[in-house]
Image (tube, rainbow, N blue to C red):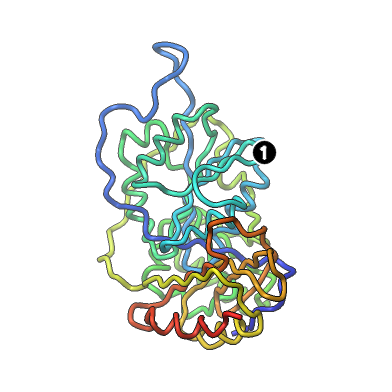
Amino acid sequence: MTPPSAPGGGGAGGGGGNPISPGVPHLTPPLSAPRGGEGVTRPPVPILLVTGFLGAGKTTVVNHLLSHAEGRRIAAVVNDFGAINIDAELIAGASGGVVSLSNGCICCSLEGDLLRTLAALLRRDPRPECIVIETSGVADPADIVRNLMDPVIFREAPLETVLCVVDATLPVEKLTDALLRSQLRAADVVALSKPDLADASSLVGVHEAVKAARPGAVLVQALHGAVPGALLFAPDPQRVPAPREVGRRLPAAERFETLSWTSDRPVSLRRFQAAIGRLAPRLARAKGLFETVEQPNRLVVFQLAGGRATLAPGAAPTAGVPRTRIVFIAEVGVLSNAEIERIMLETVA
């Protein structure tokens, strides 16, 4: 593992989260009522579904879309993996609820099932012009696509594009993972994240492997999360895409589990680096916020993905919220809460 360096540069974000609830009830009433009287119709709100494995860089892509909205009112739905809502904080700079951004976009965390969240967004005034759903890194997008094909949802919020984010530094043999291949199969566009961190031969190998796995998809490199908007959103807002066929559903398996650690006390940066070095070989992903004794009253954003750990400056601590909040994602049975607690307590100053 590359040890985390002192904060000063941004790390590649990744989406995590409990898979979006597959149980979407069928509704007969519309998700939102027309404004301005009977017969008034509004253009549909297209959905962009962002999928990809743990640590691929989904959050970085969503961040870039929100900060380069080009006049679109984008609503981003973030579904975090675990009990601590880290992803929403990374995207919006604040936690919980709906966060309004200066460019007219909004960001919210998934509350309840997906249908209720979409219905709430479609009732907002002004209404979003497009919705971006960031899935969990352990979610099979086929389940979510199946839900979005519900005719009630599709009439007002049709699925426009599925974007799969793939870490360009991933060893080619990892692309044989069943979940990752399912994510690729669903994709209309595949974005290779972190291309600047991959050597030329590895980048070519990943490119060829992705094209072989999903020959029909558009493949682009996404430096710092940048994906051309023209590939993701239709130029005609009145256009309604055709419903898509949903691939076969893979048997569900509890492959990953989440272990969370919090502390009201600051940690030693040196001890934190040592603790992460011990845990990293058994982790699929880790992320969080913490305060150090070296820099009090300032949070540090921590990311571990693909064996690389990064630290970046964060905001000031929020009163009443633990100063240190870390989520660890590992395969089931590899780590225990007791072991996490024992190792991380050694970091407290």
* 225 versus 102 height, above or below: below
Tell me which residue sits at (67%, 47%) in the image: 67
Check the picture and name the quadrant holding the N terminus. bottom right
Q: Nearer the viewer, residue 178 or 295?
A: 295
Tell me which residue sits at (65%, 67%) in the image: 300
Residue 280 x, y percent position in the rendering: 52, 83
Q: From this viewpoint, is residue 184 visible?
A: no
Identity of the residue furthest to the right in this view? 8
Residue 181 x, y percent position in the rendering: 41, 67
Q: Nearer the viewer, residue 3 or 225?
A: 3
Check the picture and name the quadrant holding the C terminus. bottom right
Residue 92 x, y percent position in the rendering: 60, 50
Say whether residue 137 is left or right of residue 100. Answer: left
Residue 341 x, y percent position in the rendering: 44, 80
Instruction: Name the residue type under label 1.
Output: Asn
Say whether residue 107 is left or right of residue 187. Answer: right
Q: From this viewpoint, is residue 148 visible?
A: yes
**Quarter of the image holding residue 230?**
top right
Q: Mark 1 highlights which residue?
A: 103
How many marks can you see? 1
Mark 1 lies on a secondary structure that is loop
The crowding category of the residue bearing disc 1, from other C-alpha atoms within 10 Å (few below 14, some 14 to 19, many at least 20), is: some
Tell me which residue sits at (48%, 58%) in the image: 85
Tell me which residue sits at (38%, 56%) in the image: 141
**Quarter of the image holding residue 303?**
bottom right
* 78 versus 272 height, above or below: above
* 218 versus 206 height, above or below: above
